[in-house]
């Protein structure tokens, strides 16, 4: 005997307005992902699985922690591109890994932070000159400047 109160609803029962809202949300997420993929190198873009907006943040899902750490170096460029294209409310970039399987491929060329980020590290190092943190930040800053100059 079938109950007249079923929790299952066919696709015909979904309102067109609700369906349209879902489609708009999906298009917005696709647009965000295309913008992000246009900023990062193609070798990294292939590892971005999804990109979602959540309040003032954008969440990027990658297939491995290796690629997430490489994408983090491009955070300022990604946020800048989003602001240029009308997503001014986004101020936070979050990275999440979908599965924890080890990737069989290694990144071929490391991606270094932009000069603005390196300068920020140098400023932090200068403000902590007398302690171990300042010394470590200064070494990091010097290394990043040397590595990025070779590119």
Image: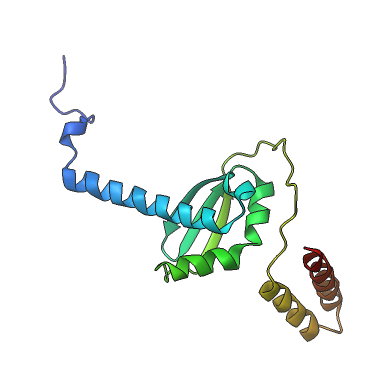
* On-image quarter of the C terminus: bottom right
Residues 5 and 71: in front is 71
Q: Is residue 3 above or below residue 77?
A: above
Residues 3 and 101: in front is 101
Residue 36 position within the rendered picture, expressed as x and y whole percent measured from the top left: 51, 56
Using the rendered view, name the quadrant where residue 103 is placed.
Answer: top right
Q: Outermost residue toward the top?
A: 1
Image point (56%, 59%), residue name: 39
Residue 86 position within the rendered picture, expressed as x and y whole percent measured from the top left: 39, 68
Q: Outermost residue toward the left?
A: 4
* On-image quarter of the N terminus: top left
Using the rendered view, name the quadrant where residue 148 is placed.
Answer: bottom right
Image point (29%, 51%), residue name: 24
Image point (20%, 29%), residue name: 10
Residue 25 position within the rendered picture, expressed as x and y whole percent measured from the top left: 33, 51
Residues 27 and 139: in front is 27
Using the rendered view, name the quadrant where residue 95 is placed.
Answer: bottom right
Residue 33 position within the rendered picture, expressed as x and y whole percent measured from the top left: 47, 52
């Amino acid at each position: 005997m079938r109950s007249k109160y079923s929790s299952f609803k066919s696709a015909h029962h979904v309102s067109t307005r609700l369906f349209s809202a879902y489609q708009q949300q999906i298009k917005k997420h696709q647009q965000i992902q295309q913008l992000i993929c246009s900023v990062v190198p193609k070798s990294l873009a292939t590892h971005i699985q999804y990109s979602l907006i959540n309040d003032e943040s954008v969440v990027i899902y990658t297939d491995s922690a290796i690629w997430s750490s490489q994408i983090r170096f491009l955070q300022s460029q990604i946020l800048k591109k989003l602001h240029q294209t009308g997503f001014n409310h986004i101020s936070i970039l979050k990275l999440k890994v979908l599965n924890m399987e080890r990737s069989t491929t290694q990144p071929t060329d490391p991606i270094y932070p932009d000069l603005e980020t390196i300068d920020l590290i140098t400023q932090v190092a200068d403000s902590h000159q007398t302690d171990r943190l300042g010394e470590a930040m200064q070494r990091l800053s010097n290394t990043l400047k040397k590595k990025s100059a070779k590119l």
